[in-house]
Image (tube, rainbow, N blue to C red):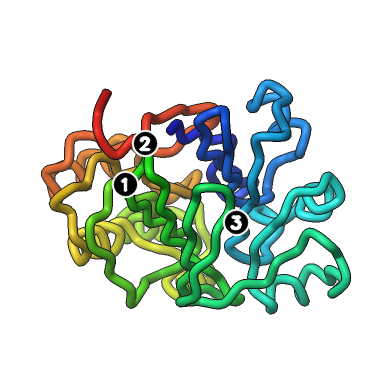
């Protein structure tokens, strides 16, 4: 199973878990044409899409996905905020703590903490083992066992943010919102360590801020703090092997 990162950041977000036979999309923040191209136009492999929340960098193209016949899982609140009609055939509202299936993927949504209702997802596939996906949340109360891969937001570092405010690059009024809506790198680390990492193969850091993060520093912080060698900062067109066991 390959994780293909189409985009990850404040402008747009989109990810694909694919083994060519079946593909699970995560987020609707990139054009459908980009998704099609990345899959070699094998649209029949798509078994569904997970949407975390209503902000446009994650959901901006949701209607084109639905109109193409892709089943998109989301919260009722996200459906309302995007003004998606209840009778839209391919929308599927889901609840935290409940189990759902999309092809051979088993999915459990869980609540994040953002300024709108936001879901993280626990994803299981026979090839990948257990995956934790969480973005646009400043924390989570959920902990999981037997994780093979963690995909988690690492949006900013306090010291970089403070320096940017002092030097006038960031308005000080931005700080309270960041603290209440996005995950700081030390919180990313403590969240990872709160889970069972005994089988963890990969950590992918998502949604890094353009100005308030440092990719090399963040990767080093997580590598040193967890002892996991395979740590990546999500970049456009990056592809990562997410099999539960190495080839």
Residues at badges 1 and 3 in contact (C-beta under 8 Å)?
no
Which quadrant: the N terminus?
top left
Residue 246: give x, y in percent of width and height.
25, 28
Mark number for residue 50?
3
Q: Is residue 153 visible?
A: no
The answer to which image quadrant residue 195 occupies is: bottom left
The disc, 3 or 2, on the residue closer to the chain's N-terminal end is: 3
Mark number for residue 242?
2
Residue under label 1, please give it. Answer: 149
Residue 168: give x, y in percent of width and height.
49, 56
Residues at badges 2 and 1 in contact (C-beta under 8 Å)?
yes
Q: Is residue 20 above or below residue 145?
A: above
Residue 233: give x, y in percent of width and height.
38, 38
How far is disc 2 from disc 1 in space, using C-alphas?
Answer: 7 Å
Q: Is residue 229 above or below residue 194?
A: above
Q: Residue at x 64, y 27 (%)?
A: 39
Determine the secondary structure under disc 2.
Answer: loop
How far is disc 3 from disc 2 in space, using C-alphas?
Answer: 18 Å
Question: Crowding near pointer 1: few (<14 within 10 Å), some, many (20+)?
Answer: many
Residue 62: give x, y in percent of width and height.
76, 54
Question: Crowding near pointer 3: few (<14 within 10 Å), some, many (20+)?
Answer: many
The disc, 2 or 1, on the residue closer to the chain's N-terminal end is: 1
How far is disc 1 from disc 3 in space, using C-alphas?
Answer: 17 Å
Q: How many marks?
A: 3
């Amino acid at each position: 199973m390959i994780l293909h990162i189409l985009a990850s950041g404040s402008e747009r977000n989109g990810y694909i878990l694919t083994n060519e036979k079946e593909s699970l999309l995560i987020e609707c923040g990139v054009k459908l044409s980009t998704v099609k191209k990345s899959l070699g136009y094998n649209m029949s492999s798509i078994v569904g899409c997970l949407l975390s929340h209503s902000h446009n960098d994650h959901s901006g193209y949701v209607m084109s996905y639905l109109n193409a016949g892709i089943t998109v899982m989301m919260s009722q609140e996200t459906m309302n905020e995007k003004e998606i009609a209840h009778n839209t055939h391919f929308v599927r509202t889901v609840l935290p703590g409940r189990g759902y299936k999309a092809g051979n993927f088993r999915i459990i949504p869980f609540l994040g903490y953002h300024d709108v209702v936001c879901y993280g997802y626990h994803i299981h596939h026979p090839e990948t083992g257990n995956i934790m996906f969480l973005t646009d949340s400043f924390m989570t109360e959920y902990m999981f066992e037997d994780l093979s891969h963690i995909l988690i937001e690492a949006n900013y570092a306090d010291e970089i943010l403070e320096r940017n405010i002092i030097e006038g690059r960031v308005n000080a009024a931005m700080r309270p919102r960041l603290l209440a809506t996005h995950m700081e790198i030390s919180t990313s680390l403590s969240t990872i360590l709160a889970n069972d990492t005994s089988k963890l193969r990969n950590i992918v850091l998502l949604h890094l801020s353009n100005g308030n993060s440092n990719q090399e520093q963040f990767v080093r912080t997580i590598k040193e703090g967890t002892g996991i060698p395979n740590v990546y900062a999500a970049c456009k067109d990056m592809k990562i092997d997410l099999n539960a066991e190495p080839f």
